[in-house]
Amino acid sequence: MNVHDSQWLGRALATRGFTEASLEEAQVVVVNTCSVREKPEQKVISALGRIRQVTGGNPGVLVGVAGCVAQQLGEAFFAKEKQVRLVAGSDGISGAPAAIERLLEDPGLRLSLLDFTSHYVEREAGPETSAVPSGPVAYINIMQGCDNFCAYCIVPFTRGRQKSRSSTAILEECQAVLDKGAREISLLGQNVNAFGQDKSGDGTSFAQLLRQVAALPGLERLRYVTPHPKDMGPEDVAAFAELPQLCPRLHLPLQAGSDAVLKSMRRRYDSEAFLRLVENLRNARPDLALSTDLIVGFPGETEEDFQATLHMMRACDFMSSFSFIYSDRPGARAALFPDKVPADIAQDRLLRLQALQDELGARWLADRKEAHEQTTLLLEGPSPKIGEGQEPSWQGRDPYGVPVHVPLPAGTDHTGRLVQARITEAKKHSLMAIRTGEPW
Ligand code: SAH
Ligand code: SF4
C-alpha cells in the first residue's frame, strides 16, 4: 500500500511537470513511511540524516515526510530536522502535490497535513489523467484505514477508520489503467471483504465489486489483498468458482495457529473456522494456492501455542508466508500485555517457522515441475540475470504470482504480453519454463 502511495505521488508530481531526479540533484525529496513494525522512527530519522548529508543541508531542497510515521510524530519532525517543511499523514498525502507547489513558491512556509477525513477522498491526477503509461500490473486502492483493532496493530491509529471508495470511482480508474495497457489489476485495502460496510461506502459489497471489475473489457487477471478471514463470506468464496479472471492465489493472513493466541490478538476467528474457510475455498477452486502472514512471540505465546502455528501451516499447505517477530506498537493494546516473549526465544521460533515454510514452498514448486505444468505467464521484463551465450530470457508471473523465467526471441519488447509455457525447473523461489506458444 505504501509503494502504491509513493507511485501515486510520483505520478501526481509528474503530471505537474516534475521529473524524477537523483538525491544529489533533487529539488524535492519525500520520504514515505510505514510504522507497522520495528523501529520505524529511527529509520526515518536516519534517512533524513542521509538526505541532509547528501544535499549538504541546503535549505533550497524541500524535504517532506509522508505516511504513517508522519501521522504519528506530526510536527515534531519540524523540530528534529530543519530541512523538513512538509509532514503529510495517511489522508494528508492526497494534498501533498499541491502543498509541495505552494512550499516551493514560499520558502518561509512549513505545512502539516495531519487531519483524518471522514469519507474517502478521491486523489487528484490519478493515472487516468497522468501522462505516465501503466505497466502490465496495476494496483487500485478500494478503501483506506481499518476498524478491526487487532491487539498488536497500529494501522487503525495511523491510517484511521475504514473508509470505502465509491465503486464508480474504482471502476473508472480500473478501466483507465486497462485502456493504458494494464492486463492485471490488484485491488488494495486493509480488510477488503469489509468493503462498502462503512458510512463512506455506496452500498456495493466486495463480492459485487469483484464481479464488476472482472467484467471490464481487457482485464486478464484479478487479485486482491488483504482479506480478513472473519469477513470472507460465501459470496467471496463463490467468486473463486465463478470468475475465471480471479487468480487461483489468495493471501489469507492467519497470524497464529493457537486459539488462545488468536483470541488475545482479537482476530475473531479460531483455527477451526480458518480450516473450514480454507476447505470451502479449495472446494470452490481446487487449484487455489494460499499464502499468509504469521507473527511469532506474541505476548503469552507458549511453545505449545507456537507448535499450533506450525501445525496450521502444514494443514493449510501455505505456498509462502511473511513472518514477523511480534513488536510493541504505541497505542496498540498488546503493548500493555504482560508475558512478553524473550527476544532469543522469539528469534528461534521465527527461524523454525521459516525453515518449515521453505520446505512447504520448495515442495509446492517441485510438484509443479514434476507435473510439467502448463501455465500462462504475464511478461514483466527481461530476466535480471542472463548467462553468456544464453538465449534472452524474460521474467513473467504465473497465475500464482510466482516469478517464472522463459527464453523468448530477441529483438522484441514482450513486456505486458501473455505467453503459454511449460515448467521445466524449480528454483528456490522461482521457476524456469519453455514457451509452448506465441506471445500475445
Ligand atoms: N490488514 C492486513 C495487514 C496488516 S499489516 C491484515 O489484517 O492481515 C501486515 C502484517 O504485519 C500483519 O498481517 C501482521 O502479520 C504484521 N504485523 C502487524 N503488526 C505487527 C506487530 N506489532 N508486530 C509484528 N508483526 C506485525
Ligand atoms: Fe491491522 Fe488487524 Fe486491521 Fe489488519 S485487520 S490492518 S492486522 S487491525
Image (cartoon, helix red, strand yellow):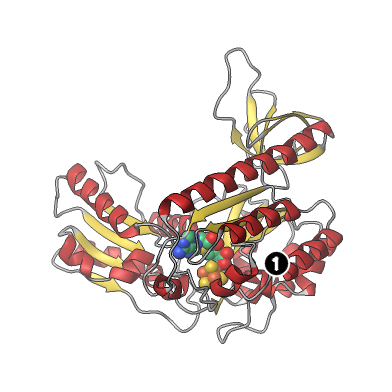
Horizontal and vertical percent for residue 6?
43, 56
Q: Does residue 256 sit above or below 137 in this rendering?
A: below
Q: Residues within 10 Å of mark 1 (few under 14, many from 20)?
A: some
**What residue is disc 1 on?**
271
Give the left or right position of residue 59, taking residue 358 as reference.
Answer: left
Horizontal and vertical percent for residue 241?
84, 62
Q: Does residue 364 sit above or below 293 in this rendering?
A: above
The image quadrant where one finds the C terminus is top right
Label 1 CB, ligand 1: below 8 Å?
no
| Residue 1 in view of the camera | no
Quadrant of the rendered structure where residue 40 is?
bottom left
User: Between residues 115 and 110, which one lies in front from this camera angle?
Assistant: 115
Q: What residue type is labelled 1?
A: Ser
Question: What residue do we see at 65% from left, 23% from top?
Answer: 410
Quadrant of the rendered structure where residue 382 is?
top right
User: Between residues 390 and 307, which one lies in front from this camera angle?
Assistant: 307
Give the left or right position of residue 108, taking residue 439 as reference.
Answer: left
User: Going by the picture, which residue comes out furthest to the bottom?
Assistant: 199
Quadrant of the rendered structure where residue 331 is?
bottom left
* Label 1 secondary element: helix
Horizontal and vertical percent for residue 439?
75, 35
Give the left or right position of residue 294, taking residue 57 as reference.
Answer: right
Give the left or right position of residue 318, taking residue 244 as reference.
Answer: left
Question: What residue do we see at 74% from left, 71% from top?
Answer: 273
Question: What residue do we see at 73% from left, 38% from top?
Answer: 363
Question: What residue do we see at 83% from left, 37% from top?
Answer: 374
